[in-house]
Image: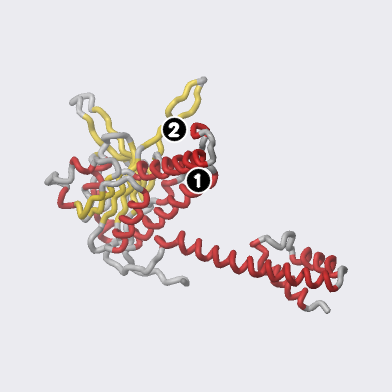
Amino acid sequence: MGFRKPEERKQGLKILAYGENNAGKSLFALSFPSNGIIDSESKIGVYENDPEYKDNIAGIADTSDYFETLNLAEDVVSNPDTYKTFTIDSYTNIYNGMQVAAMENEENRARKKGGNVDDATVSQRGWGKVKLNTIRFDGYIAQASAKGITVIAVAHKDDINKEVNGKQVKIGEKPSLRKNAEHTFDVVLRFFKEKDIATNEYKFYVEVEKDTTKTHKIGTKIENATYELFKDYIEKNNKGKTLETKYDKQVESNINSMEQEQESHDQVVAEFKTLFAEATKKDSSNKEVIANVMKEKGVVKYTDPTKTTELKEVIEFIKGLA
């Protein structure tokens, strides 16, 4: 794939809605049209027959299973005419489920080895799989956006604390997701509620923490947030051309490419070992000669996969030895 000229294209918005419980996150998501919703916490069921929201719902899936979520994401990106919005409520629950699965895998491995299950912790490999799965799902989020579908990821919040005079003091809030998860999204909204001292009733707000669309300034506080906040932007950016993209296949594509590179490297290493053995058997002094050439080429270890090209040059030199 090469560069292309800028053009009018479809581009869905990626929104992260996080914050305290019962602050309006789900209702915000439900105000968006043609919504395919993954309900991982059995919350949407309260509203799915509500006259105010039911016509916005194109489909609901009641699951917190990561792999089912992937299949549902595949369905969404394959049907952009059916789903104008894709909501994951909550993304925190899906992410936590992946971590639980990783922990259970470690416990099962401990049982099979006769170890103490209570001492089992998620290994570096396990955390790597959690990260890989998260990246894979982020690819589906990007693919949905490229198809003109608005993605809303609802998340819980964690408090940010700082030690002051020996005590933990809350200084802020952040999404209860992996570190730097907010980088995946175009818009980050923090939901919170405040009690009106005059009426004794709660008011519901969002604070804009990120908005790459430049629709709202950072720090803007808005009461009773709905689809109307970004309606103009979304509808304007849903009239252009749909680009052919493969963000949802990026992990598999990268893995396949790496496997091909590894296979090619393994073949080069095998050829080097054969030729090196033959050359040194023919003349033992060739060992030092070849070692010097490798040093000149920067090949410290012939097994280094980052030096495949240089190792090929060493192979050509060996072939030219008399």
Closer-to-camera residue (60/113) = 113
Q: Specify the quadrant that holds the C terminus.
A: bottom right
Amino acid under disc 2: Ile
**Foreground: disc 1 or disc 2:** 1
Q: Which mark is residue 126?
A: 1
Specify few, some or many for label 2: CA neighbours under 10 Å numbering under 14, 14-19, or 20 or more.
Answer: few
Residue 306 percent across, percent down from the top left: 65, 62
Q: Most extreme residue toward the left, as rendered?
A: 51
Amino acid under disc 1: Gly
Q: Is residue 36 left or right of residue 177?
A: left
Closer-to-camera residue (209/126) = 126
Give the structural element (helix, strand or loop) at label 2.
Answer: strand
Residue 142 percent across, percent down from the top left: 38, 58
Query: Which residue is at a point 29% across and 46% down the rendered structure image?
Result: 63
Q: Which mark is residue 160?
A: 2
Specify few, some or many for label 1: CA neighbours under 10 Å numbering under 14, 14-19, or 20 or more.
Answer: some
How many labels were placed on the picture? 2
Question: Is residue 270 shown above or below 217?
Answer: below
Evaluate whether residue 214 shows in this view.
Answer: no
Query: Which residue is at a point 38% across and 46% down the rendered structure image?
Result: 210
